[in-house]
Amino acid sequence: MARSHDVLTTGEVASICKVAPRTVTKWFDSGQLRGYRIPGSKDRRIPVDQLVRFLRANNMPVDGLVHFNKTRVLIVDDEPELVDSLRDLLSREAHYEVASAATGFEAGIVAQRLKPHVILLDINLPDVSGEHVCRLLRTNPDLQMSKVIAISGAVIDADVPPLMQQGFESFLRKPFTVQQAIQAVESAMAVVY
């Protein structure tokens, strides 16, 4: 039932809330539950954040949203040991949904599919600069809300402010701990939500 985006159908909302789909339709049509209609159709879509707002306003449990609220993280780095270790630790300790890519090209494909909330992006990739990847992500309407955190072991302090001006949310200097990575992801997510 887990989805790779943050919008639900009325059937999915009904399943989460343990009500009939018609009940969700009534909530939507009365304006209690916000969302949008698919153009040219009667189908409705409800953003997860609007469902959370609705559930909390009506004192309903939000535990049915566990699969939908999982933070999605994409690690883009060409060091397999770092990626494997970080992917395992972020999945196990922070319960993130984690994917990885070793090149800028692969990052674009995985990001389009995963629609990550946060991207940990090595700025020294073998095929293209991390700065270029960040610029491309910023031009994609589906990925503009993704927060991009630069990672590198070869950046001096003077290089960090220009990175922030190029669209990066923050910077992690290698080597970093999993706690530092989690803190950076959580800080970026606090800005989004």
Image (cartoon, helix red, strand yellow):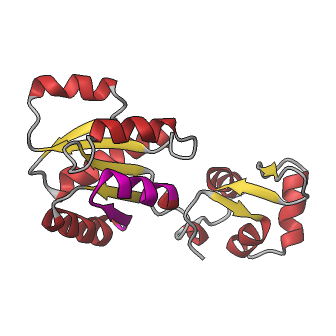
Q: Residue at x 36, y 53 (%)?
A: 105
Could you tell me residue 161's position as x and y percent? 23, 23
Name the image quarter holding residue 52. Answer: bottom right
Q: How many labels does the image show?
A: 0
Q: Nearer the viewer, residue 44 or 189?
A: 44
Could you tell me residue 130's position as x and y percent? 28, 41
74 relative position to 16: left or right: left
Relative to 92, is 124 above or below? above
Name the image quarter holding residue 136. Answer: top left
Relative to 82, is 20 above or below? below
Q: Residue at x 23, y 68 (%)?
A: 89
Residue 96 is at least partly visible in this image: no
Could you tell me residue 5's position as x and y percent? 58, 59
113 relative position to 154: left or right: right
139 relative position to 61: left or right: left
Could you tell me residue 97's position as x and y percent? 40, 66
Residue 167 is at least partly visible in this image: yes
Q: Which residue is drawn at 33% across and 37% down?
A: 132
Q: Which residue is drawn at 40% across and 34% down?
A: 135
Residues in magenta, as a range: 95-112
In the image, residue 17 lies in the stretch drawn in magenta: no
Q: Which of 121 and 188 is in front in this view?
A: 121
Q: In which quarter of the image is the N terminus?
A: bottom right
Name the image quarter holding residue 129. Answer: top left
In the image, residue 101 lies in the stretch drawn in magenta: yes
Relative to 161, is 119 above or below? below
